[in-house]
Image (tube, helix red, strand yellow):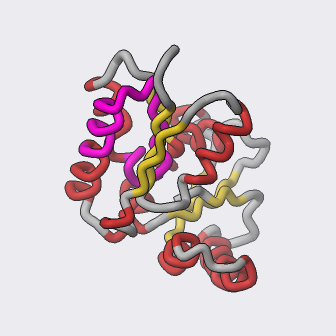
Amino acid sequence: MNGKIGIFDSGVGGLTVARAILNLLPNESLLYFADTKHIPYGEHSPREVESFAMRITSFLVQMGVKLLAIACNYSSALIYEKAKELYPDIPIVGVLQEGAKLSAHSPYRKLGILATKGTVRTRIYPKEVKKINPLKEVVQASCPPLVSLIESLAPEESIRPVLKNCLKRLKSKLRHSFSAALITPW
Protein backbone atom coordinates (compact mmCIF):
# COMPACT_ATOMS: atom_id res chain seq x y z
CA MET A 1 0.00 0.00 0.00
CA ASN A 2 1.32 3.45 -0.90
CA GLY A 3 1.50 6.22 1.64
CA LYS A 4 3.22 6.86 4.92
CA ILE A 5 2.37 5.75 8.41
CA GLY A 6 1.14 8.81 10.30
CA ILE A 7 1.95 9.22 13.97
CA PHE A 8 1.06 12.07 16.29
CA ASP A 9 1.64 13.05 19.86
CA SER A 10 1.62 16.24 21.87
CA GLY A 11 5.42 16.22 21.88
CA VAL A 12 8.45 14.00 21.50
CA GLY A 13 7.24 11.13 23.69
CA GLY A 14 5.60 9.55 20.66
CA LEU A 15 8.99 9.14 19.04
CA THR A 16 9.24 5.90 21.05
CA VAL A 17 6.22 4.70 19.07
CA ALA A 18 7.86 5.83 15.82
CA ARG A 19 11.03 3.94 16.76
CA ALA A 20 9.05 0.78 17.53
CA ILE A 21 7.24 1.00 14.19
CA LEU A 22 10.52 1.43 12.32
CA ASN A 23 12.01 -1.54 14.17
CA LEU A 24 9.08 -3.70 13.08
CA LEU A 25 8.69 -2.19 9.60
CA PRO A 26 12.10 -0.80 8.59
CA ASN A 27 11.09 -0.16 4.96
CA GLU A 28 8.13 2.07 5.82
CA SER A 29 8.09 5.86 5.67
CA LEU A 30 6.69 7.77 8.62
CA LEU A 31 5.06 11.17 8.97
CA TYR A 32 5.36 12.38 12.58
CA PHE A 33 3.39 15.33 13.97
CA ALA A 34 4.39 16.73 17.38
CA ASP A 35 1.93 19.32 18.67
CA THR A 36 4.44 21.18 20.81
CA LYS A 37 2.31 24.34 20.66
CA HIS A 38 -0.25 22.82 23.07
CA ILE A 39 2.00 20.67 25.24
CA PRO A 40 1.24 19.21 27.74
CA TYR A 41 -2.14 17.90 26.65
CA GLY A 42 -2.85 16.62 30.15
CA GLU A 43 -3.31 20.19 31.35
CA HIS A 44 -5.98 20.99 28.72
CA SER A 45 -9.70 20.30 28.85
CA PRO A 46 -11.08 17.26 27.03
CA ARG A 47 -12.83 19.55 24.52
CA GLU A 48 -9.54 21.32 23.68
CA VAL A 49 -7.56 18.10 23.30
CA GLU A 50 -10.28 16.56 21.16
CA SER A 51 -10.14 19.61 18.90
CA PHE A 52 -6.31 19.50 18.64
CA ALA A 53 -6.29 15.76 17.98
CA MET A 54 -9.07 15.78 15.38
CA ARG A 55 -7.39 18.63 13.46
CA ILE A 56 -4.11 16.72 13.44
CA THR A 57 -5.88 13.52 12.40
CA SER A 58 -7.60 15.36 9.55
CA PHE A 59 -4.28 16.88 8.45
CA LEU A 60 -2.52 13.49 8.43
CA VAL A 61 -5.40 11.91 6.50
CA GLN A 62 -5.21 14.75 3.95
CA MET A 63 -1.48 13.99 3.66
CA GLY A 64 -2.46 10.50 2.50
CA VAL A 65 -1.36 8.33 5.42
CA LYS A 66 -2.18 4.65 5.05
CA LEU A 67 -2.26 4.00 8.80
CA LEU A 68 -2.58 6.36 11.76
CA ALA A 69 -1.00 5.79 15.17
CA ILE A 70 -2.30 8.01 17.95
CA ALA A 71 0.78 8.06 20.19
CA CYS A 72 -0.83 10.21 22.89
CA ASN A 73 -2.84 8.42 25.57
CA TYR A 74 -5.12 11.39 26.27
CA SER A 75 -5.87 11.83 22.56
CA SER A 76 -6.45 8.08 22.22
CA ALA A 77 -8.93 8.23 25.08
CA LEU A 78 -10.85 11.10 23.53
CA ILE A 79 -10.87 10.55 19.75
CA TYR A 80 -10.00 6.94 18.97
CA GLU A 81 -13.58 5.78 18.31
CA LYS A 82 -14.58 9.00 16.55
CA ALA A 83 -11.53 8.87 14.26
CA LYS A 84 -12.26 5.24 13.36
CA GLU A 85 -15.84 6.19 12.44
CA LEU A 86 -14.79 9.24 10.39
CA TYR A 87 -11.99 7.41 8.54
CA PRO A 88 -13.13 3.79 8.17
CA ASP A 89 -10.70 3.12 5.29
CA ILE A 90 -7.63 3.95 7.36
CA PRO A 91 -6.45 1.58 10.10
CA ILE A 92 -6.14 3.56 13.33
CA VAL A 93 -4.15 2.41 16.34
CA GLY A 94 -4.27 4.11 19.73
CA VAL A 95 -1.46 3.58 22.22
CA LEU A 96 -3.93 3.65 25.09
CA GLN A 97 -6.06 0.89 23.60
CA GLU A 98 -2.99 -1.22 22.79
CA GLY A 99 -1.55 -0.62 26.26
CA ALA A 100 -4.84 -1.67 27.83
CA LYS A 101 -4.83 -4.91 25.79
CA LEU A 102 -1.31 -5.74 26.93
CA SER A 103 -2.19 -4.90 30.53
CA ALA A 104 -5.35 -7.00 30.47
CA HIS A 105 -3.33 -10.03 29.42
CA SER A 106 -0.49 -9.54 31.91
CA PRO A 107 0.00 -12.30 34.50
CA TYR A 108 -0.58 -9.78 37.30
CA ARG A 109 -3.95 -9.17 38.90
CA LYS A 110 -3.15 -5.64 40.09
CA LEU A 111 -1.88 -3.00 37.69
CA GLY A 112 -0.53 0.46 38.37
CA ILE A 113 -0.80 3.05 35.58
CA LEU A 114 1.17 6.31 35.47
CA ALA A 115 -0.17 8.85 33.01
CA THR A 116 -0.94 12.55 32.55
CA LYS A 117 -3.68 14.23 34.57
CA GLY A 118 -5.95 14.27 31.52
CA THR A 119 -5.56 10.57 30.80
CA VAL A 120 -6.18 9.67 34.45
CA ARG A 121 -9.31 11.87 34.54
CA THR A 122 -10.84 9.96 31.62
CA ARG A 123 -10.66 6.70 33.63
CA ILE A 124 -10.38 4.94 30.28
CA TYR A 125 -7.45 2.67 31.16
CA PRO A 126 -9.38 0.86 33.91
CA LYS A 127 -12.48 0.69 31.67
CA GLU A 128 -10.56 -0.73 28.69
CA VAL A 129 -8.63 -3.25 30.81
CA LYS A 130 -11.78 -4.42 32.61
CA LYS A 131 -13.65 -4.82 29.30
CA ILE A 132 -11.07 -7.43 28.35
CA ASN A 133 -10.38 -8.87 31.79
CA PRO A 134 -12.82 -7.95 34.58
CA LEU A 135 -10.60 -9.63 37.18
CA LYS A 136 -7.88 -6.98 36.89
CA GLU A 137 -7.56 -4.26 39.50
CA VAL A 138 -6.29 -1.03 37.92
CA VAL A 139 -5.06 1.96 39.91
CA GLN A 140 -3.91 5.15 38.22
CA ALA A 141 -1.84 8.14 39.24
CA SER A 142 -0.74 11.22 37.37
CA CYS A 143 2.86 12.38 37.39
CA PRO A 144 2.90 15.94 35.97
CA PRO A 145 6.62 16.66 36.49
CA LEU A 146 7.52 13.61 34.42
CA VAL A 147 5.95 15.05 31.26
CA SER A 148 8.12 18.17 31.21
CA LEU A 149 11.26 16.13 31.92
CA ILE A 150 10.53 13.72 29.07
CA GLU A 151 9.63 16.51 26.66
CA SER A 152 12.79 18.45 27.49
CA LEU A 153 14.82 15.28 26.82
CA ALA A 154 16.22 15.47 30.35
CA PRO A 155 18.93 12.96 31.20
CA GLU A 156 17.90 9.72 32.88
CA GLU A 157 19.50 10.73 36.19
CA SER A 158 17.10 13.71 36.37
CA ILE A 159 14.08 11.56 35.57
CA ARG A 160 14.83 8.70 37.97
CA PRO A 161 14.06 10.53 41.29
CA VAL A 162 10.83 12.02 39.91
CA LEU A 163 9.74 8.64 38.61
CA LYS A 164 10.61 7.02 41.93
CA ASN A 165 8.44 9.57 43.78
CA CYS A 166 5.52 9.04 41.38
CA LEU A 167 5.77 5.27 41.73
CA LYS A 168 5.82 5.67 45.51
CA ARG A 169 2.54 7.63 45.34
CA LEU A 170 1.05 5.02 43.03
CA LYS A 171 2.08 2.24 45.38
CA SER A 172 0.44 4.00 48.32
CA LYS A 173 -2.80 4.28 46.33
CA LEU A 174 -2.92 0.53 46.13
CA ARG A 175 -2.74 0.35 49.98
CA HIS A 176 -0.09 -2.34 49.76
CA SER A 177 2.56 -3.54 47.35
CA PHE A 178 1.44 -3.76 43.76
CA SER A 179 2.33 -6.54 41.41
CA ALA A 180 3.23 -4.56 38.30
CA ALA A 181 3.41 -1.05 36.90
CA LEU A 182 2.86 0.05 33.32
CA ILE A 183 4.50 3.37 32.56
CA THR A 184 2.77 4.82 29.56
CA PRO A 185 4.31 6.85 26.78
CA TRP A 186 2.91 10.36 27.00
Magenta extent: 55-77
Q: Residue at x 59, y 59 (%)?
A: 113
| Image spot of residue 73 (x, y percent) | 47, 51
Q: Is residue 52 above or below residue 144?
A: above
- Whether residue 56 sits left or right of residue 15 in the image: it is left
- Whether residue 172 sits left or right of residue 178 in the image: it is left
- Quadrant of residue 59 in the image? top left
- Say which of 110 and 39 sits in front: 39
Q: Residue at x 46, y 37 (%)?
A: 6
Q: Is residue 16 above or below residue 173?
A: above
Q: Is residue 104 visible?
A: yes
Q: Is residue 88 above or below residue 128?
A: above
Q: Is residue 41 above or below residue 166?
A: above
Q: Is residue 127 visible?
A: no
Q: Residue at x 41, y 68 (%)?
A: 117
Q: Residue at x 63, y 52 (%)?
A: 16
- Quadrant of residue 56 in the image? top left
| Image spot of residue 85 (x, y percent) | 29, 24
| Image spot of residue 30 (x, y percent) | 53, 37
| Image spot of residue 143 (x, y percent) | 53, 74
Q: How many marks?
A: 0
- Say which of 114 and 64 sits in front: 64
- Say which of 113 and 154 sits in front: 154
Can residue 134 be found in the magenta stretch? no
Can residue 72 be found in the magenta stretch? yes
- Quadrant of residue 101 in the image? top right
